[in-house]
Amino acid sequence: MNSKLVFFIRSNNDLDHMCPIIWRISEINKESHISIYTTGVDHYFPTDFRIKFLQKISNVSYCGDVVINSSNNFLDKALVQSIIFLNARKISSRFSDKLMVFLTKIYQKKINNISFSNRFIRENLTDISAIVFDHSYYDFYSNIAAQNLKYGYKTIATPHGHDLFLNRMIKDHLFYKNPSNLQMPTIESKVDKIIFHNEFYMNSAIDRGIVSKENSLSLGSSRFDLRWVKKLREMRKSLRQVDLFDDKKIKIVFMLSKQGYNSFPEELDRIVKLLSLFDEIGVVIKPHTRNQKFLSKKYNNIFFDNKHEFYSTDLIDWCDVVLFEHSCICLDPIQLNKPTILISSTHANLLVSNGVMLNWEVRTRDDLASFINRFISDPSTKTYTSKEKNKFLSQTIHEKSTTPLDDYAELVLNI
């Protein structure tokens, strides 16, 4: 099957979820040709190790930013390069941050302009089988979806991330008398297939009118398919490794979530202070990857990765224990059977693991101290059983199959 496919990547999240699909398609169908375009400037895509990996595959082409690729206007290209430069700065200032926000709005207005998207479609998408982008309200994507009949391609929207929440008022500013009726803008109805990572969230989106039942589909997780989890390790092997703390220490990484999701920052500070009391452990505090920082006093046994020197996968492989708040990053160490602990005291949310993972939750600092002392006494301590793990994964990312990447590839190739 000689399929011409296009993937649009808007942010780092989409690299996580689309790169494995592209890789799997390239393995299954050597005759397909896959083009990758980027539609965001919050990440410098050309240097990303996943993009570099895909560029080595003969039937994959990285085409770069849609504005740079499709415009001969010097000012348009200068706009993109300026945002990339500002976003890559290690030290930000109030002026540079405001300037980046202002320029990013201009960029988004540019690509969402209907005349720009129409020209891009005419010049690049007239001989394409299928187009893949993320769940997004970009007018650029909506216009592409609206012209599928005119140009004969199919469109697929994939998950932008993995949501583990059971509650719906997940952010500080959300207040609804009836949260089950919480409304959101609808995803473009002309998209041929809108993919979810499990039926719970698909049905929730259908019930709230975000998507229609007819064009929705649950396929599981591309990012956390075990083959991609292992492939990431292969890619990272020759890249920067973590070399922190004495090997005799119990090594812990604490994966922080983005603030604003019903967060209790004061309790997070107290958790960090508690961790600092244990000389037997070495801790890396990993802030959320979207330029987040965690400001704290210095402790001898704690490293704050505020400059994002280490990739999450490398830290997970380095450590003995993973702590997390509510991020889907927990699915990575679980796939590898690594001890993982849910810190639920730093936020007011309920996760889908509730009632399934019975022994991994820290509700109080007493619980955390107990866990750490157990690991110090016995580093082989487990935080979940195989039965709990399998049930949790089946509910979140392996609903229909333990090889969801095959299902994604089959859909894109045969839609």
Image (cartoon, rainbow, N blue to C red):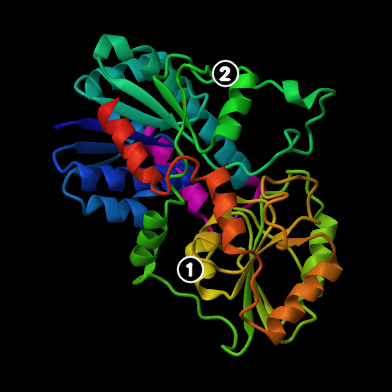
Vertical relation: 193 (above or below) 197: above
Is disc 2 surrounded by few (<14), some (14 to 19) or many (20+) residues within 10 Å? some
Quadrant of the image occupied by residue 150:
top left
Q: Which residue appears at 79% of the width and 55% of the height?
A: 346
Q: Which residue appears at 81% of the width and 63% of the height?
A: 269
Q: Which mark is residue 186?
A: 2
- The residue sitting at the top extreme is 150
- Does 21 sit left or right of 395 as displayed? left
Residue 55: percent from left, percent from top:
24, 51
Is residue 87 inside the magenta stretch?
A: yes
Q: Which residue appears at 57% of the width and 44% of the height?
A: 395
Q: Which mark is residue 252?
A: none
Question: What kind of element bears circle 2?
Answer: loop
- Does 110 sit left or right of 410 as displayed? right
Residue 74: percent from left, percent from top:
33, 32
Is disc 1 surrounded by few (<14), some (14 to 19) or many (20+) residues within 10 Å? some
Span highlighted in magenta in the image: 73-95
**Who comes first in sequence, dot 1 or dot 2?**
2
Q: Which mark is residue 314?
A: 1
Residue 373: percent from left, percent from top:
76, 81
Residue 326: percent from left, percent from top:
67, 51
User: Magenta region, mostly helix, strand or loop?
Assistant: helix
